[in-house]
Image (cartoon, grey):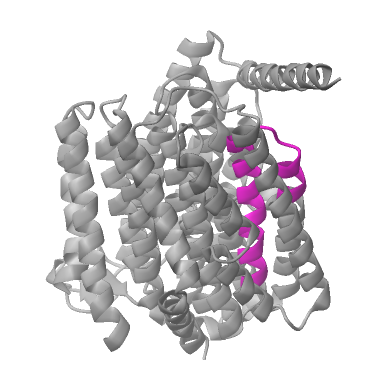
């Protein structure tokens, strides 16, 4: 319980202080890194409690249970919190080594960590909205980081579209409260079976639209390429490796746990939308010439796999979705961080990330793809699409590799040695997960079990 | 009463969505504000009960639902904060682009992409010429 509270309080209090300081000073930047590391440490301690013993709960403000807001850490939430915290830490270290350009950057990243930790560790639907909005607000300002026309235009699109998404989420929260009379996720999940199916479907569609916007799935993707290519690499890594996890988590939590019947009903629709995403993202990524554009479209394609796995459902499907979200987030962090870099080992690091995106062993992407194939084994059409999508991703990543590193189209100053070692460390993590996937597989199955148990 | 709330929320949401599709950035902000108000109205409507004020210790049996009021208040505060943020963002965009039309922002981005494309095409031609 202490670890649960600390994981939330450290970045929250720390972020509030850091926002007031001048982040361009090196000390402040390293302070932010320290706070993110402390957040990660608290989450690791929490994970060691949650994984063997099950859910850890706390009620805020010493209210009696049922009145106060509950914080609930289960395997699913802890895994996503760990992943996002790791993403923010890597991106922040990368930016601090390069020299922070705006005073609010370190503080806002720490605030974002507080928001994300809260989103993944809350057991209350409205509290989820508050933390969701906290992390989004920090991300809106982060998207302007750099302050040139390009970033401002991207931030404007990002903010408007995502605000619309969060308000649609809020409408669905109001609907869920109206039909179940509770905001507690566990209670709502128990009561939702007796709800009028029409109302429940409407609510589920609202949640789906809100999280699809966050994930950047095919019909909701229009904001994504502008933002991911317009933002600076570290910010793009934060958005795609940290923030986009909310979308996958929300789909799993609200679809898998709260509205399992509606999810099963929409199974075919989800698989179709997911496949459309895979094809659209893959085809457009092939036609791109710069790595950031390629990665932006690749992000649309890669979340398609996650959606298909969620559509397949069941414990195998959810486990595959969780595992692929983790792998995809790590790939995106790695590749976005290398976008503007040049140096002796950058090419090798990029190649490893590219192998992981394409799903070739020994990188972690292979394990993710393997689980996806296992989940979709019953439907040949989906399998064919997966193979096609993987082939496309192989083409687009190595096409860019060829342009950037063989032809030497990537220009700019040589990156510092410390930055190069940072991306090498991230690459080693991706490699290690591919070589020894057992812990990650076990974790994702534990997390999927939480959902399977809730769905009964 | 529920119908009245539903109609009001729908009208406000519709107006907001219409404004959101405008070119003028200030109207886009107003659209977001209206949509946030529609959400607040729905939150209030989600817990419509008649009763005494829910002040602790409770003296009467039937109190009105305090939760939806609490949620609405929180949503209003968050809505205010994001509106302020969005207005500042629009101000910075107006200063950077010297225009408040979304088309000019899009045009700038398209020009940037076209420039990149041109650059790559020229490089490609150079290489082919060298190969020949």
The residue located at (34%, 48%) in the rendering is: A90
Residue at image position (52%, 86%) is: A455
Q: Dividing the image into 4 quarters, which one contains the N terminus of chain A?
A: bottom left
Residue A139 coordinates in the image, percent (x, y):
40, 41
> How many marks on residues?
0
Q: In front here: A182 or B106?
A: B106
Residue A441, position as x, y percentages in the image = 47, 78
Residue drawn at 33 percent across, 67 percent down: A122
Side of A453 relative to A369 (left or right): left
Q: Is residue A72 left or right of residue A386?
A: left
The foreground one among A373 and A252 is A373
| Residue A153 visible in the displayed image | yes
**Residue at the far top in the pictured view:** B98
Task: Name, please, the residue furthest toward the bottom.
Answer: A456
**Which quarter of the figure has residue A265?**
bottom right
Residues A200 and A333: in front is A333
Residue A221 shows in this picture: no
Q: Position of residue A155 (x, y in %)?
A: 49, 31
Given residues B51 and B47, the one toward you in this image is B47
Magenta region = A281-310
Helix, strand or loop: magenta stretch = helix
Relative image position of residue A325 (x, y in whole percent): 52, 63
Q: Is residue A212 above or below residue B37?
A: below
Rendered position, A346 above or below B75: above
User: Residue B58, relative to residue B76: is it above or below?
Assistant: below
Residue at (23, 80) in percent of width and height: A49
Residue at the right extreme of this rendering: B132
Membership of A440 in magenta stretch: no
């Amino acid at each position: 319980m202490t670890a649960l509270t600390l994981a939330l309080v450290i970045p929250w209090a720390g972020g509030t202080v850091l926002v007031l300081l001048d982040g361009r000073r090196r000390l402040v930047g390293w302070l932010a890194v320290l706070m993110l590391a402390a957040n990660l440490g608290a989450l690791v301690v929490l994970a060691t409690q949650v994984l063997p013993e099950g859910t850890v709960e706390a009620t805020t403000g010493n209210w009696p249970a049922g009145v106060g807001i509950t914080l609930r850490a289960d395997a699913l939430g802890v895994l996503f919190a760990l992943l996002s915290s790791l993403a923010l830490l890597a991106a922040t270290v990368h930016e601090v080594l390069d020299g922070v350009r705006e005073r609010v950057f370190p503080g806002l990243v720490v605030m974002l960590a507080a928001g994300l930790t809260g989103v993944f560790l809350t057991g209350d639907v409205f509290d989820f909205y508050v933390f969701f909005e906290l992390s989004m607000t920090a991300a809106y300002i982060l998207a302007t980081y750099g302050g040139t026309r390009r970033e401002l235009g991207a931030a404007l699109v990002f903010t408007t579209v995502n605000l619309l998404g969060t308000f649609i989420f809020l409408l669905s929260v109001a609907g869920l409260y109206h039909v179940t009379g509770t905001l507690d996720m566990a209670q709502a999940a128990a009561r939702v079976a007796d709800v009028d199916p029409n109302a429940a479907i409407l609510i589920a569609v609202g949640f789906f639209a809100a999280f699809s916007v966050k994930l950047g799935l095919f019909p909701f993707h229009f904001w994504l390429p502008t933002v991911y290519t317009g933002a600076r690499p570290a910010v793009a890594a934060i958005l795609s490796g940290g923030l986009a996890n909310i979308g996958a988590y929300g789909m799993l939590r609200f679809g898998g746990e709260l509205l399992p019947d509606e999810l099963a009903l929409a199974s075919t629709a989800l698989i179709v939308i997911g496949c459309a995403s895979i094809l659209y993202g893959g085809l457009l990524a092939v036609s791109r010439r710069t790595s950031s554009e390629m990665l932006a479209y690749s992000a649309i394609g890669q979340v398609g796999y996650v959606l298909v796995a969620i559509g397949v459902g069941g414990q195998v499907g959810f486990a595959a979705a969780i595992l692929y979200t983790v792998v995809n987030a790590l790939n995106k962090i790695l590749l976005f961080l290398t976008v503007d870099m040049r140096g002796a080992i950058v090419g090798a690091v990029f190649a490893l990330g590219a192998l992981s995106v394409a799903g070739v062993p020994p990188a972690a992407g292979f394990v993710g793809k393997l689980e996806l194939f296992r989940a979709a084994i019953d439907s040949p059409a989906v399998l064919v699409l997966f193979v096609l999508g993987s082939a496309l991703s192989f083409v687009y990543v190595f096409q860019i590799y060829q342009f950037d590193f063989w032809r030497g189209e990537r220009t700019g100053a040589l990156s510092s040695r410390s930055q190069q070692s940072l991306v090498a460390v991230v690459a080693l993590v991706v490699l290690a997960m591919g070589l020894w996937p057992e812990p990650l597989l076990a974790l994702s199955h534990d997390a999927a079990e939480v959902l399977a148990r809730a769905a009964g | 009463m529920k119908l009245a709330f539903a109609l009001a929320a729908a009208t406000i949401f519709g107006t907001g969505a219409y404004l959101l599709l405008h070119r003028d950035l200030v109207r886009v902000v107003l659209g977001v504000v209206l949509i946030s108000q529609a959400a607040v109205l729905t939150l209030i409507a989600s817990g419509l009960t008649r009763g005494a004020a829910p002040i602790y210790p409770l003296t009467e049996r039937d109190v009105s639902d305090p939760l939806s009021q609490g949620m609405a208040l929180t949503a209003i505060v968050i809505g205010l904060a994001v509106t302020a943020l969005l207005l500042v963002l629009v101000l910075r965009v107006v200063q950077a682009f010297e225009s408040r039309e979304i088309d000019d922002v899009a045009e700038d981005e398209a020009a940037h992409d076209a420039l990149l494309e041109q650059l790559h095409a020229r490089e490609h031609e150079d290489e082919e010429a060298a190969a020949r």
